[in-house]
Amino acid sequence: MEQDPFKKDHYLNSKLDEYYVNIPDFPMKPRAGRWGRFINLLASPAKNPLEPLISTTDGLILLIGPIAGAAALTVIQILFFL
């Protein structure tokens, strides 16, 4: 079941035989075990899901809104309970 298309075309086969590619031998890293993969999963940084929304002008309300709301609740509590 030999299906090499380059054996039929001698010119192409001779041109391919002219080239030699030297592949360097890189040392392989040992595979991390199950515990090492779990630690890498926990240590990987998380992506902020609100990042694209906050970068717009409408998303700025999401950033400033909770801060302003907390400040307003604090002022209301100070005014009523003191």
Image (cartoon, grey):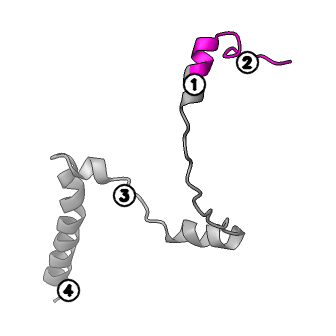
User: Please, which residue is most extreme toward the top here?
Assistant: 8
Q: Left or right of 80: which side holds 44?
A: right
* Circle 3: residue type: Asn
Mark nearer the N terminus (3 vs 2): 2
Towards the viewer: 59 or 19: 19
Which residues lie in the magenta part? 1-14
- Indicate which label's residue lies in the foreground, 3 or 1: 1
Q: For the image shown, how many numbered marks are present on the structure?
A: 4
Mark nearer the N terminus (3 vs 1): 1
Residue 12 colored in magenta in the image: yes
Callout 3: SS: loop
Q: Residue at x 17, y 66 (%)?
A: 68
Pointer 1 residue: 16
Residue 16 colored in magenta in the image: no
Pointer 2 residue: 4
User: Please, which residue is most extreme toward the right here?
Assistant: 1
